[in-house]
Amino acid sequence: AQSVAQPEDQVNVAEGNPLTVKCTYSVSGNPYLFWYVQYPNRGLQFLLKYITGDNLVKGSYGFEAEFNKSQTSFHLKKPSALVSDSALYFCAVRDHPIQGAQKLVFGQGTRLTINP
Amino acid sequence: DADVTQTPRNRITKTGKRIMLECSQTKGHDRMYWYRQDPGLGLRLIYYSFDVKDINKGEISDGYSVSRQAQAKFSLSLESAIPNQTALYFCATSDSRGGRPEAFFGQGTRLTVV
């Protein structure tokens, strides 16, 4: 069964500095990988995804993520953090549509705080 | 209007009561999901449905049941609510066609069992 780990419960970054939110995964076969963001009292919003192709994917609000197959990681990054990026971030994985059951499984979330 | 609508948004109920959470979508997606969110545990899958006749248990289905009344509607029931079912519940949809596997979420239902 697929699984996702976000090793940091909380990440604190100064405004203007680069940020990284870490994610590692386990899945049989080729994964579909996703990042979502949750603002207070809101549902989850889709940020970006990796399906195939270029290992560096770009998404909403200036975020990007790098797929690393050998390290089974999909870390979320942004070159310059904004205070408005403060939120709860979730990594998710889905297994291949042919090979697996296609369930979408989430990590436990990382709370990102950007300090002015 | 929201593409994925959950009702109610907030609910307080007593232990032992039956409660239904409803989800409807206007996205035309074939797949629908129910998750619960608890602090520090992320989102855990309760049930998922790939079409009207396909219902599957997720990792924490005990104490819950679901009904896919139509492609656009997927309801979650707690037959006899207990306090540890207090959580934030999310419905989500995705499309098996068109190369867009990402899920879209409703605003959530905050359920408190007292």
Image (cartoon, rainbow, N blue to C red):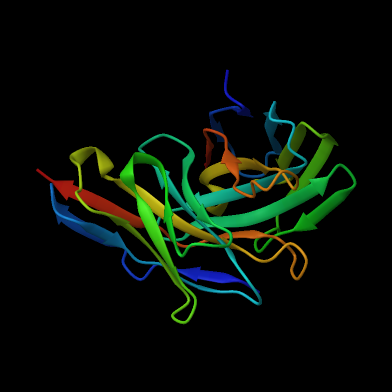
| Quarter that holds the N terminus of chain A | bottom right
Q: Say which quarter of the image contains residue B79.
A: top right
Residue B22 visible (yes or no): yes
Task: Please tell me how many numbered marks the rendered image carries.
Answer: 0
In this view, A32 is above or below B83: below
In this view, B3 is above or below B54: above
In this view, A70 is above or below B90: below
- Residue sitting at 65 percent across and 77 percent down? A28
- Residue sitting at 35 percent across and 71 percent down? A7
User: Residue at the left extreme?
Assistant: A116
Q: Residue B86, position in %: x, y?
A: 52, 47
The front one of B70 and A84 is: A84
Q: Residue A67, position in %: x, y?
A: 45, 67
User: Residue at the bottom extreme?
Assistant: A70
User: Residue at the front extreme?
Assistant: A54
Residue B78 visible (yes or no): no
Q: Is residue B85 left or right of residue A88?
A: right
Q: Residue A38, position in %: x, y?
A: 40, 43
- Residue sitting at 26 percent across and 44 percent down? A86
Q: Residue B21, position in %: x, y?
A: 67, 35
Q: Is residue A25 left or right of residue A23?
A: right
Q: Say which quarter of the image contains residue B72.
A: top right
| Quarter that holds the C terminus of chain A | top left
In this view, B32 is above or below B10: below
User: Residue at the top extreme?
Assistant: B1
- Residue sitting at 68 percent across and 60 percent down? A103
The front one of B37 and A54 is: A54
The front one of B87 and A39 is: A39
Q: Is residue A2 left or right of residue A5?
A: right
